[in-house]
Image (cartoon, helix red, strand yellow):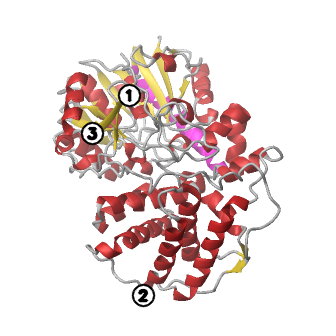
Amino acid sequence: MSEERRTKDRAPGRRAGAPRASRPGPRAAHADEGAQARADKRPERRSGGFSARSGREARPDRAQNARSAGTRRPAAAGAQDRPREARPSVALHAPRTQARPGNRAPRPRTAPAQSGLNARRLALDVLTDVREKGAYASLALGERLRAAHLSPEDRRLATGLAYGTLENQLQIDYALDRLMDHPTREPVQRDILRMGAYQILFLDRVPDSAAVDEAVKLTRAMGMEAACGFINAVLRNLSRGKDEIAWPDREADLTGYLSVKGSMPRWLVEKLVAAYGPEEAERVILYREEEHPVCVRPNLTCLSDAEFVTLLHEKGWRAERGLAPHAWLIYGAGDLAADADYRAGRFSIQGQSSMLAAEALEARPGMKVLDACAAPGGKSAYLCEQMQLTGRVYAWELHEKRAQLLEGVRRRLGLDNLRISVRDALDFRPDLEGMLDGVLLDAPCAGLGVLSQKPDIKLRLKQEDIPAIVDTQGRLLDTVCRYVRPGGALVYSTCSLLPEENGDRVRAFLASHPNFALEPLPTSFPEELRERQTPFGLQLLGCRDGVEGFFIARMRRVR
């Protein structure tokens, strides 16, 4: 049964114009196991298989939980809904100075006086990885944090700067471009300006003067001494003129307003407005999390919910019940993946919507079920534990490296009933037809429901990508549904918000597969969510439900 949630006090510093969620939002570190690994779930990813493999144990990535470098402040306070004609202060020209990577000094492992600079430089390196190499932000950040040996405070600073800058990049660029007659095209300078502007426009705890000063120091450290005066002037002008920025007029151009204020491409804004209507779409697009807890749950094979509550109290963590069964939201506890009880397998880090997707399958002891796109492993683990280590959970993953994450989960939690294979789920296995009690397909998708974990999605996703994603989802459904025995269950889920990937996809599947029918979600789901189920599934929204944006549909093979 669902667990009753307690109402928590909200922290000050809420961003103006962003809807307030009814409960805390998901955290960037909520990726199932291996913290940042879920960002590698590319639109073209397909996974699955039954071929036996032992797999080398993968060291779980440490959760990079506090993304915020400070409390958000309202962006351009008081000015966001009243456009002005005047451009603030002096128009500036960018110098032609180029970064000289060869002159960069090696980053010291321990340098207290340089710690803030090292954190900012690491964040800048992540922005460079995303821009130049097409890297996924969470993966690039995780790799650099593991190599940098920063203090916990500096890890939070670097994470907050990188994620916050990417999450708000279009709005930041809009503001910066109105301060310069000829905006700089030098990419490193541009990223330094973006990081400084993010702090000036969105953070309270970092004084504007400090943000400017640190940006100048970073510019100098990058070997761009000639650009220091330019960086200083632009950011000081932004600090003085941020309340005078002429943002797009909401009434005259809602799409332009939401595109800038939500840092989202116009084509994507138009899609969301068409799907949800102007008011709901505005809440979806402008939603930003106020606090960033890490979601954890007990190992269901060794701890009851009551015993897990006792464990949390013993640790002295600030904890609050989540929306999903067994979910708890932890605040300010640092690196939970380094905790001794986590390493001993007594609890797991997993997003609430991911838990709900696994919960929807209603796995029971003795069943044989398939997790068709399984990495990084949180849902597979949830199913194994629900079955009390009996039966079989087959976990298929296309990529060898990501399959190693599953092996690490299996060993840490002692999941003797988990069978991991490196296999493409699009390749049909005739010998398994009609043999399984349940199949969970968490399909590759556009990822628009987890933008706080993957803010770079908004920068990389193209409109022409969507049809190929939807086609892959349809072919995966057509393939894996054949493994479900009569009377068995098929759960389809995505971490996206687009109807063509979700309700429309299920509608088309049911029309072409009359031997399947949609079922109500289990009674273990919170009643408020069960009431929102449509004839084609449940859409979760961060701005409304306080969890990751997910879609979940449970279907039964009726014949």
Per the model, the C-alpha gap separating discs 1 and 3 is 26 Å
Residue 265 visible: no
Is residue 185 rendered to the left or right of residue 144? right
Mark 1 or mark 3, which has the lower sequence index? 3
Q: Residue at x 19, y 41 (%)?
A: 412
Q: Quadrant of residue 237?
A: bottom right
Counting the numbered discs, the total is 3
Query: Quick one: label 1, few (<14), some, or many (20+) residues within 10 Å?
Result: many
Q: Quadrant of the N terminus?
A: top left
Mark 1 or mark 2, which has the lower sequence index? 2
- Mark 3 residue element: loop
Query: Quick one: label 3, few (<14), some, or many (20+) residues within 10 Å?
Result: some
For badge 2, the amino acid type reads Asn
Is residue 524 rendered to the left or right of residue 44? left
Please give the label number shown on residue 103. 2
- Mark 1 residue element: helix
Please give the label number shown on residue 358. 1
Q: Which residues are magenta?
A: 463-484
Q: Magenta includes 483?
A: yes
Frontmost residue, 179 versus 421? 179
Query: Quick one: label 2, few (<14), some, or many (20+) residues within 10 Å?
Result: few
Percent x, y of residue 350: 35, 38
For badge 3, the amino acid type reads Trp
Percent x, y of residue 300: 23, 26
Q: Is residue 442 above or below residue 513?
A: below
Mark 3 or mark 2, which has the lower sequence index? 2
Of tags 3 and 2, the one toward the viewer is 3
Q: Residue at x 33, y 59 (%)?
A: 153
Frontmost residue, 10 versus 287? 10
Residue highlighted by disc 3: 317
